[in-house]
Image (cartoon, helix red, strand yellow):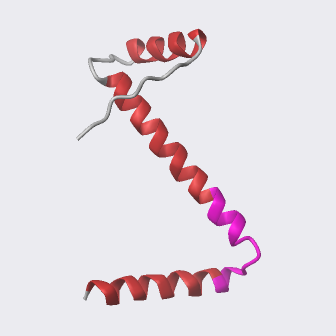
């Protein structure tokens, strides 16, 4: 399933992206795939930075213990 978006970008961004796609053998649908990947990547990094900020006061051992607990809980929930 997919959703249509109407986006507004600068002319310079449009030219740069379309030139990049043309140089890399872009085909029909590559613009949409590029935007989809870029959005998912941006969300990933924003989330990661938020977690780093939120957990910046934890020691490595405390962070590992929290991760281990979360993995154990996920495995227990799956069983």
Please state if 69 lies on the left or on the right of 52 as rendered.
Answer: left
Q: Is residue 10 above or below residue 44?
A: above
State the image coordinates of residue 55 (x, y, percent, origin top left): 69, 72
Residue sitting nearer the eye, 22 or 49: 49
Residue name at image x 28 percent, y 17 percent: 27
Q: Position of residue 76 (x, y in %)?
A: 33, 90
Asked whether 45 or 4 is in front, the reply is: 4
Q: Residue at x 33, y 16 (%)?
A: 25
Q: Which residues are magenta?
A: 49-62
| Residue 54 on the magenta segment | yes
> Image check: 38 left or right of 33?
right
Q: Residue furthest right?
A: 57
Quadrant that contains the C terminus: bottom left
On screen, 31 above or below 65? above
Q: Please tell me in which quadrant of the rendered image residue 54 appears.
A: bottom right
Apparent side of residue 37 relative to residue 25 in the rendered image (left or right):
right
Secondary structure, magenta segment, majority class: helix
Q: Is residue 41 magenta?
A: no
């Amino acid at each position: 399933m997919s959703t249509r978006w109407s986006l507004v970008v600068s002319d310079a961004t449009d030219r740069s992206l379309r030139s990049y796609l043309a140089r890399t053998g872009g085909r029909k649908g590559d613009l949409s795939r590029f935007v989809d990947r870029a959005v998912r990547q941006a969300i990933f990094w924003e989330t990661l930075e938020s977690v780093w900020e939120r957990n910046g006061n934890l020691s490595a051992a405390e962070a590992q213990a929290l991760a281990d607990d979360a993995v154990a809980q996920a495995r227990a929930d799956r069983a």
